[in-house]
Amino acid sequence: TRRRLPPGPVPLPVIGNLLDVASRLPPRSLARLAERYGPLMMLRLGSAVVIVASSPAAAREVLRTHNGSITGRNAPDAWNGAGHAANSVFVLPPRRRWRALRQVGTEHLLSPRRLDALRPAVRAAVLEMRRRVSESTAAPVEVGRVAFEAMADLMWRAMFSSGLDVATLGELHGVAREAVLLALTPNVSDFFPTLAALDLQGVRRGMATQMGRVYELIDQEIDKRRRGPETGSRDLLEVMLETDQGNIDGVVMNRDTMRAFLTTCVECSDIDNLPYHQAVVKETLRLHAVVPLVPNKVENPVEIHGHTIPKGSTVIVNLWAIHRSAEVRTDPSKFIPERFLGKEFHFQGTEDFEFMPFSAGRRICLGLPLATRMLHVLLGSLLKDFEWTLPEKAMENGLDMSEKLGLTMSMATPLDAIVKGM
Ligand code: HEM
C-alpha cells in the first residue's frame, strides 16, 4: 500500500518534515508545499503521520464523503493538563460523551430559543464593553482585548446569569494569552508521543495551571448558586443542577459538563438587514481563518483520490489555503467584502467547500450560531458608537496585518486604536 500513500516531501530521519513546516505561519508553509505536492499530501512530523487537504475538492472528501471515518482528534498533549482533554468538546473522540455534550450545548446554550432569551445578556455585555471603551479616550484601546472580554462576559452570563467583574475579566484575558503562548510552542510531546509522559518542555504543566484557574472560577459559581437563594434563572447552570446526579443521554451533568463549555460567546440582531456588514465579517473570516488548520483523526482507513489514508493518521484541512486559493476566487489576498454581496455564501459553508470558516461535517463549530451573532453585534457597536483613529506610528507605517497561530489565529501585533469621539 506504500505506493498509494499521498505524495509529499522526503522526510528526514527522526524529525521527518518538521523543518518544512516550521515557520512563523505554518498554514502558509503547508500551502506552499501543496503547490508542489498537490491538494492531498503526506508529511511526517516526528513520528506522527499527517495528511493535508488543501483544495475544496479534497476538503469535500474529508468533511463530507468520508466524514464518518475521519471525525476523531489526536489531542495535543497540552490538553491533558488538568485533565482538560476529558472535558473538551474540541478534542473528545466522536463517541457518547462528545455526542451528549454537543447535544447539551445545542439545546441548552445555543438553540434559537436560548439565543433569543440571551438578548438581554448580550445587551448587558455590549453596554459594559461600550462603557469601558468610552473611558479609554486618553490611551489607545487594545481592540482584541476589549472584544475578548465582552465575549467572556457574555459566555458567563449565558452559563451563570451573572456578569464578570473587571478584575476577573482581566485575569481571564491573561489566562487566554498564556494559553495561546503555550499552544504556540512546538511541543516535542506531540511529535514523539512516546516521550509525552516526560512533558519535557512543561507545556502540559503550564496549561494545567491556566485551566485550573478557569475551573476554580466555575466551581465558585456552582458553589455560590448551591448555597444561595433561588434565582429563577433558566441558564446552563440551572439545567445542570436540576439534572445533577441525573444524566442526559448517558452523560452525568456535573462540574465537568460546565467545563466543557469554557469557550467564549454572544446576540441576535438585525444582521439579515445589514448585508454589507455581513459581507465584511465573512471577508474577515475568509482572509483570517480563526481555526486555519482543522485537525481530524482517521478512525478507519479510507481511499481519497486513489490514495490510502491510514488509520490513526491526522488529516488536516487547510482552511487558510482554501480560503486564499487563486483557483476559486480573484485577488484572493485582497480584502474585498463586495465578493460576498448578492451571493449565497452561508456561514455554515458553501456547497463546493470554498468558504467554510466554521468548517463542516459532524464536528462543525458548535459555537457557530452564537459566534456569528456576537461578531456582528460587537463590530456593529464598536463602529456605530465610536469614531476611531490609529496611533501615530501605525498611521505612518501602516497597520501590521501579519498573523500568528496559537490556540487560534490572531494578529501578530495586537490592534491598538484610539477613540476620537462618540
Ligand atoms: C468567529 C468565531 C469562531 C470561528 C471562526 C470558529 C471556528 C471553528 C472551527 C473551524 C472549528 C473546527 C471544526 C472541525 O473540527 O471541523 C471549531 C470547533 C469548535 N468550536 Fe468554534 N469557532 C468560533 C467561535 C466559537 C465559539 C464562540 C464557541 C463556543 C460557544 C465555539 C465552540 C467550538 C467547539 C465546542 C468546537 C469543537 C467542535 C467539535 O469538535 O465537535 N467556537 N470552531
Image (cartoon, rainbow, N blue to C red):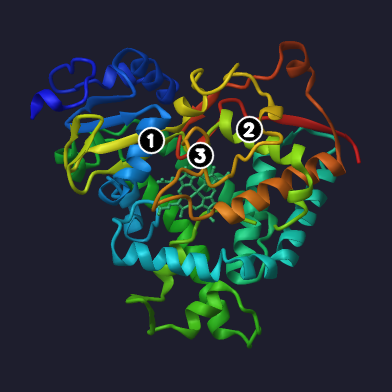
Q: Residue at x 37, y 61 (%)?
A: 87
Q: Residue at x 58, y 45 (%)?
A: 347
Q: Residue at x 74, y 42 (%)?
A: 379
Amino acid of disc 1: Ala
Give coordinates of residue 198: x percent, y percent.
Answer: 19, 42
Amino acid of disc 2: Thr
Label 3 sits on a secondary structure element that is loop
Q: Residue at x 25, y 49 (%)?
A: 69
Please state which of residues 102 and 420 is positioned toward the viewer in this rendering.
102
Q: Residue furthest left?
A: 1
Some atom of ligand 1 lies within 8 Å of the CB belonging to the residue at label 3: yes
Of the image marks 2 and 3, the number of the one nearer the N terminus: 2
Q: Which residue is mark 3?
A: 356
Please state which of residues 400 and 168 is positioned toward the viewer in this rendering.
400
Give coordinates of residue 64: x percent, y percent.
Answer: 36, 45
| Horizontal arrangement in the rendering, residue 47 relative to residue 168 (left or right) | left
| Horizontal arrangement in the rendering, residue 138 relative to residue 59 (left or right) | right
**From mark 2 to mark 3, how far is it between C-alphas?**
12 Å
Q: Assess disc 3: are there few (<14), some (14-19) or many (≥20) residues with their C-alpha within 10 Å of its C-alpha.
A: many
Please state which of residues 348 and 76 is positioned toward the viewer in this rendering.
348
**From mark 1 to mark 3, how far is it between C-alphas?**
10 Å
Label 1 sits on a secondary structure element that is helix
Q: Residue furthest right?
A: 421
Q: Are marks 1 and 3 in contact (CB under 8 Å)?
A: yes
Q: Which one is closest to the eye, mark 2 or mark 3?
A: 3
- Is residue 144 something that shows in the picture? yes
Quarter of the picture containing the N terminus is top left
Amino acid of disc 3: Met
In the rendering, which numbered label is found on residue 284? Answer: 2
Give coordinates of residue 186: x percent, y percent.
Answer: 33, 30
